[in-house]
Image (cartoon, helix red, strand yellow):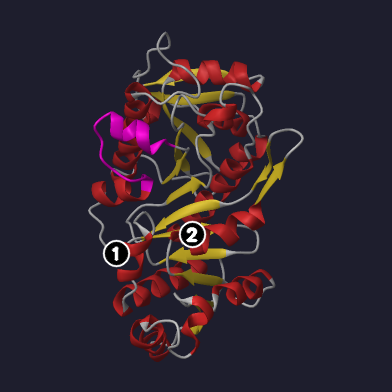
Amino acid sequence: MEKTRPILGITMGDPAGIGPEVAAKTLATKEIFDISKPLIIGDANVMNQAVQIASVNLKVRSVSKVTDAKFEYGTIDVFDLKNVDMDQLEHGKISAMAGNAAYEAVKEVIELAMKKQVYGTVTGPIHKESINLAGHHFSGHTEIYAHFTKSSDYAMLLVSESLRVIHVSTHVSLRQACDLVKKDRILKVIQLLDNACKQFGIESPKIGVAGLNPHASDGGLFGWEEEKEIIPAIEAAKAMAFDVEGPLPADILFPKAKGGCYDGCVAMYHDQGHIPFKFEGFIWDNEQGKMKTIKGVNITLGIPIVRVSVDHGTAFEIAGKGIANPDSLILAIKYAAKMVANRME
């Protein structure tokens, strides 16, 4: 492998969403080819259409194996799955065909990474309803990766310019999320976060842990999870020489983290981590009716391959209009290239 330019498999996401357009805009950025060898996993006909929608001056090359790709700026190499009927494809519409195409691209990129034909994976946005309509019953990318890599101790990490947030639980109901706040799980995600920060070049990460209840339970007034599960996990982490603090009320933890107090944060459930993360990195332009800025990526930890994703959805409401923002995918590729390089050292 050429260390400075690892081959990255990049799924185009749901063909009815903004994923293909965002991929085309991203691969029109010269810097991407300076740091990686990008290979789109998906359908070449969809990417040809995406080039037109994105109004970028790029060619599309269909390949059937990784070794056929040229990785030349100005051309998009597509590992062509040929699984989209362009006569049936409708932007902004949920469909089993689009869901199946998105799912097959994810499954293929995982297989290529496990075979070491690509050295890192980057995923475009999928639509969960479309994937399930196609008969693939997963709640998201993370669960698909865990299934096909046979991983059990995995977690979602969100990364932006000033926040890194890992989750004790993600795609479960809020009622279930409370039941999943357990000492062993919290300790595991602290370990995963510490290791990830070191892959980003942070030698001695400082980690802040959120409480589950309001005011981190205020000494037991508002719940018992802090005393029985979260504090014991933090004490165990400190005994293992991790630099960790908490539990802190979430409304205190995240402002402190944004100000530089922590290199990473542990959130107890999905929205507790996602809301402050997206409040910082997503900027809505009400006059234009679209996101002005989308900055942030989603990294799956605890699996044997590198997986980084955009942290936005399919945005069906603007699909096919040529106005989608590529910032998140550009950042995802940068993180994937950095993580692959650090793993090879």
Question: In the rendered image, is residue 168 in sight?
Answer: yes
* Earlier-in-chain disc, 1 versus 2: 1
Q: Position of residue 302 (x, y in %)?
A: 34, 61
Give the class, few, some or many, for how many residues have Cα within 10 Å of label 1's Cα (few <14, many ≥20). few
**Numbered label tally:** 2
Residue at image location 31% in from the left, 76% down from the top: 182
In the displayed structure image, the side of residue 172 where residue 18 appears, left or right: right
Question: SS of the residue at dot 2?
Answer: helix
Residue at image location 34% in from the left, 63% down from the top: 175
Residue 153 has which mark? 1
Q: Which residue is mark 2?
A: 271
Residue 87 has which mark? none
The residue closer to the viewer here, 8 or 284, is 284
Query: Which image quarter holds the N terminus?
Result: top left
Residue 27 vertical placement versus 305 (above, below): above
Residue 251 vertical placement versus 73 (above, below): below
**Which residues are drawn in magenta?**
126-141
Label 1 close to label 2 by CB (< 8 Å): no
Q: Position of residue 80 (x, y in %)?
A: 38, 22
Question: In the rendered image, is residue 248 in sight?
Answer: no
Q: Is residue 138 magenta?
A: yes
Res 326 → quadrant: top right
The residue type indicated by label 2 comes to: Asp
Residue at image location 59% in from the left, 20% down from the top: 51
